[in-house]
Image (cartoon, rainbow, N blue to C red):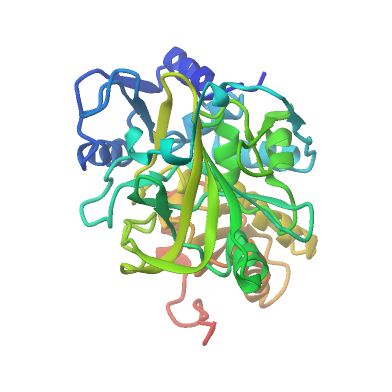
């Protein structure tokens, strides 16, 4: 039985002992971020902050939602002890059996509605996460929803959003991301604003899929249904024609205005570094906010070794790359995008059937959109367990010839 909302998921984590309620008052300014970072570094239970400085008891914050494999397994309805390899197999089977969403006319996310001058992003405890961030980030664990104006494709992704003022957000829209492929040529290129919706705190599979690689033109909401093994309920926005998860805690609606840029960032990223300096970036003008009573705000703290992005990607990207390699008929055994490599490292085990198989494997990975961030491919024999980092590093140190064993692809 899939979780209907984030609150059912929290209740399950309480049952399995994978969450910790923090009753002591904490500060949204860096303290929450520091605690979340420490939780990720130690693999501790997810923090559920009950009292946030400057906010009443009706506001809570749930952090590090899927930053352990245990919590990810629970979100998928599996045993907490399910291994990454088992999760990859199950994810792939469910991915191949999508289930379309159902539309509902009412849902918890409509319990409170603010439109126009009532909008105030500061009503919610968005944290200042890292020292050096450009501001408070409202959206770091959420679902970003936009629609291709020329087709029925609706993209669900996860793209950061910094607060500029009470009704304006700023964010990074990369041209290679699906949101960028929609926004730049199809809205800004035509001089039109792009409608958007951000869902904070939906049930956990929606955010899980928002982080992953779903092919261009495929509706992530269908994949969410497949992974949940039952359809997700969606409800129409107040100010545009987009549909959002009906049980989300907070929903932000508005438009990305064309040809307007305001400085945004920097932001501490999942790489463990600030990925880019403060720079002019698109703005998201908020027209409405709807939310549940006593909303549970969700947030993540990007950084190494693990976070709520790299753990899900270890499952989803591994499945995507394995599917690609097998489709080419390459005799591989397993693929693992190890979370310690922050998505930049893919380990592939194979029966070495012929010469240059490692080059063929790496070329196939880099030909897949899911491999665009993989800068290092390690190919090992079938006696090496790609899921055992000690086994992999032992093979690297003892079996790799430092000259003949490494191939560098120039200008790639």
Quarter the C terminus occupies = bottom right
Residue 326 image point, x, y percent: 76, 58
Residue 102 in which image quadrant? top right
Q: Which quarter of the figure has residue 150? A: bottom right
Furthest toward the front, the residue is 117
Q: Position of residue 83 (x, y in %)?
A: 55, 35
Task: Tell whether 325 sits left or right of 383.
Answer: right
| Residue 254, image x, y percentages | 54, 48
In the rendered image, the residue lying farthest to the top is 15
Residue nearest the viewer, comparing 161 with 391: 161
Please indicate, yes or no, whether residue 385 appears anywhere in the rendered image.
no
Front-lying residue, 333 or 127 = 127
- Residue at horizontal 42 percent and vertical 34 percent from the top: 298
Residue 152 in view: yes
Toward the bottom, the furthest residue is 410
Please report the residue visible at 47 percent of the width from the left and 67 percent of the height from the top. 399
**Residue 131 vertical placement versus 85 (above, below):** below
Relative to 105, 378 lies left or right: left
Q: Residue at x 61, y 70 (%)?
A: 191
């Amino acid at each position: 039985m899939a979780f209907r909302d984030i609150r059912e998921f929290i209740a399950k984590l309480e049952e399995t002992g994978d969450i910790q309620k923090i009753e002591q008052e904490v500060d949204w300014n860096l303290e929450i971020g520091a605690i979340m970072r420490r939780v990720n570094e130690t693999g501790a239970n997810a923090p559920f902050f009950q009292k946030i400085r400057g906010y009443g008891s009706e506001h809570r914050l749930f952090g590090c939602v899927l930053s352990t494999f245990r919590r990810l397994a629970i979100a998928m309805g599996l045993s907490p002890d399910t291994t990454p390899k088992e999760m990859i197999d199950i994810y792939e089977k469910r991915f191949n059996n999508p289930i379309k969403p159902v539309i509902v006319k009412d849902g918890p996310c409509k319990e409170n509605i603010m439109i126009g001058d009532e909008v105030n992003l500061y009503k919610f405890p968005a944290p200042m996460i890292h020292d050096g961030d450009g501001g408070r980030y409202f959206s770091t664990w959420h679902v970003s929803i936009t629609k291709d104006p020329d087709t029925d494709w609706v993209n669900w992704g996860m793209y950061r959003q910094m607060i500029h003022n009470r009704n304006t957000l700023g964010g990074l829209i990369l041209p290679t991301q699906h949101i960028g492929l929609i926004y730049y040529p199809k809205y800004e290129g035509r001089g039109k604003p792009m409608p958007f919706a951000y869902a904070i705190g939906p049930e956990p599979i929606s955010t899980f899929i928002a982080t992953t690689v779903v092919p261009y033109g495929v509706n992530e909401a269908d994949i969410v249904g497949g992974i949940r093994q039952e359809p997700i309920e969606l409800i129409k926005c107040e100010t545009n024609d987009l549909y959002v998860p009906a049980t989300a805690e907070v929903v932000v609606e508005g438009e990305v205005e064309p040809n307007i840029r305001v400085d945004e960032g920097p932001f501490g990223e999942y790489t463990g570094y600030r990925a880019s300096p403060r720079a002019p970036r698109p703005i998201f003008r908020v027209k409405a906010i709807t939310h549940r009573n006593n909303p549970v705000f969700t947030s993540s703290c990007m950084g190494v070794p693990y976070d709520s992005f790299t753990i899900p990607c270890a499952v989803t990207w591994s499945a995507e790359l394995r599917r690609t390699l097998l489709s080419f008929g390459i005799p591989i055994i397993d693929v693992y995008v190890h979370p310690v490599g922050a998505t930049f490292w893919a380990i592939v085990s194979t029966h070495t059937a012929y010469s240059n198989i490692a080059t063929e494997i790496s070329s196939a990975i880099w030909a897949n959109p899911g491999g665009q961030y993989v800068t290092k491919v390690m190919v090992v024999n079938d006696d090496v367990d790609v899921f055992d980092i000690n086994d992999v590093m032992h093979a690297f140190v003892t079996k790799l010839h430092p000259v003949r064993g490494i191939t560098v692809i120039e200008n790639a």
